[in-house]
Image: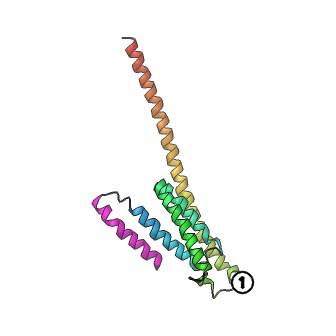
Amino acid sequence: SVWVGTTIVIFLLALPSARRGHEGRWTVYAVIVLYGGCVAWLISLFGFVSGPWNAVAPLVVLLVPIYWDLPAGRVAFVFALVGMGLVSFLELTGRIPFAPLMLQRTLEAKQSIGWHLFTCVVISTVLAYVFLLIHFSVSVRESQQRRLEMAQRELKAASRHKSEFLANM
């Protein structure tokens, strides 16, 4: 499968940096390009603008700055815009077929329970994954903020005690 192959390639690219104990900051950009390309290809198989599948790209773009950082998020945002534009252009000009997996299906087939379950499970899973990571990230940031505020209060109190001590000498 293309998805498994992409994941293996990303793993193999990141492995040397990880084994050497280096940060490997460049690997996030490889993930964005390789994984993003794979997601765009998979979405185009169902028709880029023919269903809920195009919701996956913005959700993944939201995930990148939360999981990594803002520069990576900017790259993911630009990559998603260019990728969506490119896929739409290729579909509209007939260079790639529109929704090749759906060519043999009728409109009525999209109204089957199986199709709805499959679509809902995939989209809901991506949505839940992104929501949970954003939730955990915000929770950690709020906890850090509370600890910083407490440390600041303690530092001010220590500074005030030091000033009082020095004034009484």
**Nearest to the observer: residue 135 or residue 57:** 57
Q: Looking at this view, name the residue that lies furthest to the front.
A: 93
- Residue drawn at (52%, 59%), measured in percent from left and top? 63
- Residue drawn at (42%, 24%), measured in percent from left and top? 159
Where, by quadrant of the figure, is residue 126 drawn?
Answer: bottom right
Spot occupied by residue 64 in the image (x, y as percentages of width and height): 50, 59
Where, by quadrant of the figure, is residue 154 drawn?
Answer: top left
- Residue 16 is one of the magenta-drawn residues: yes
How many numbered markers are drawn? 1
**Which stretch is magenta?**
1-22
- Residue drawn at (51%, 65%), measured in percent from left and top? 79
Q: Amino acid at mark 1?
A: Glu
Reading the image, the residue beneath label 1 is 108
**Nearest to the observer: residue 110 or residue 100:** 100
Spot occupied by residue 138 in the image (x, y as percentages of width and height): 53, 49
Against 22, is 7 above or below?
below
Against 163, is 54 above or below?
below
- Residue 91 is one of the magenta-drawn residues: no
**Secondary structure that dominates the magenta span:** helix
The C terminus is located in which quarter?
top left
Spot occupied by residue 165 in the image (x, y as percentages of width and height): 39, 16
Tell me if 158 is positioned left or right of 115 in this view: left
